[in-house]
Amino acid sequence: MDLDAFLTLLTPRGQQALAEAEALLAEGGDEVRAATTMRRSHDTATTSAALTQAALRRRASRKFGADAGRMYFTAEGLEQATRAEVADHRARRVAALGQGGGVADVCCGIGGDLIAFARHGCAVDAVDLDPLTAAVARANAEALGLTGVRVRRADAADVDPAAYGVVFADPARRRRSGSRIFDPLAYSPPWPAVLELTGSAAAACVKAAPGLPYEFVPDGAEVEWVSFGGEVKEAVLWLGGFLPGHGPQLTRRATLLPYGETLTGVGAPRRAETGPIARYLYEPDGAAIRAGLVAEVADLVGGRLLDPNIAYVTGDDAVDTPWASGYEISEVLPFSGKRLRAALRERHVGELTIKKRGSAVDVERLRKDLRLSGDRSAVVVLTRIVDKPYAMICAPMRNPAVHG
């Protein structure tokens, strides 16, 4: 979809085409058949743009809920856009800062974050280098009736950070092909340019991929890893005015949504104690692992690590916590495919969930080799303990004391 085709969608004729495309897809028709039907009354470019937009809206409902039905998207923009609940979490902190001057959203994409900022009462000046993306963000602000928002096509480098109370940056991390970019130096703008821009602001917030290496974090920053529904969504740098009286040490924060739970640590991660396998196994949430807060999770469950370098925690008690998935261990085996197959068949296991950390085992090949056919389910955890491979047969924790 190019800019001209998108702008056509915003006209009365384009809106009619979009409504028809949504109705045809909602009826269960495929896009090829829908395109044939629509081309009887619309040109090819409008038909293609309308069907693309209708399909993107259906996909976007997972991130934007009911708003998706009024919004506009590009495929790349939707992939990188912040989930509404995560954007809302970030916007609350920005709004609570209470600094004048508004928010500069310097890589606004399709506008997921500017929506949250505006709904929390912030004046937003949003820019994006790509003309189509900027047009989509502007259309979204208008479609949702947002006030105090300006969207324009501009380079982030042309924004004066001193003119705003907060600068927010979400550099592009996807190629046109849709593949992810993992190297921060290949972001657009590149990481050094992002830090130079935000470092001159009174307060700044930078969104990055969850795997952001620590060496790319400036001294004295706070890094927050945000998890939603058990999946780590992003790393966020908080800089300047968000850290009043903050010392030179790095602050590490993990946040769980939708619970709103937070764990923090300062400086280097604390090492947890290690010890023998107990009755229960805990798998810390990915945000806590990324933030180097596994020792803090171990404290919450009264446990210890099985191996000093692997984030599995074991403990004697069943503890219900949003910070870890819990499993009751029924058997521990030195890893052997043959022995594991025999143990699972003895338990009549046919449905198997395989988890691994610190193991080189090919999970899909193992699953085929096990050839299970029972009527029960189990969880197998593959890991390494002091350089030796083990398999633990488990069940998700179901303790009457904590689950009723």
Image (cartoon, rainbow, N blue to C red):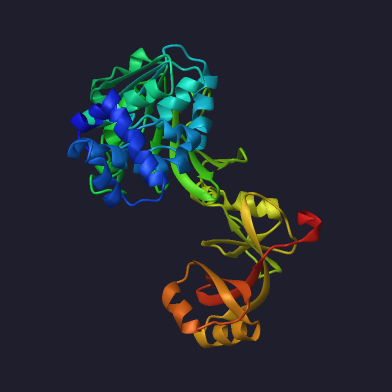
Residue 79 at least partly seen: no
Residue 343 vertical placement versus 387 (above, below): below
Write down the quadrant of residue 189 in the picture: top left
From what the image shows, is residue 41 above or below residue 26?
Answer: above
User: Where is 287 relative to 11, above or below?
Assistant: below
* Residue 9 shown left or right of residue 265 in the figure: left
Residue under the point 74% across and 64% down? 316
Residue at 51% in and 21% down: 120
Give how far across and how far down residue 243 sits, in percent.
50, 26
Foreground: 350 or 266?
350
Q: Confirm whether residue 347 shows in the render.
A: yes
User: Whole-percent x and y of residue 16?
Assistant: 32, 30
Q: Nearer the viewer, residue 386 or 340?
A: 340
Residue ID at (72%, 56%): 319
For the C terminus, give its image quadrant. bottom right
Residue 197, position as x, y percentages in the image: 31, 25
Q: Position of residue 292 (x, y in %)?
A: 52, 49
Q: Residue furthest front?
A: 40
Asked which quadrant contains residue 13, the reply is: top left
The residue nearer to you, when weighing 230 against 59, is 59
Quadrant where the N terminus sits is top left
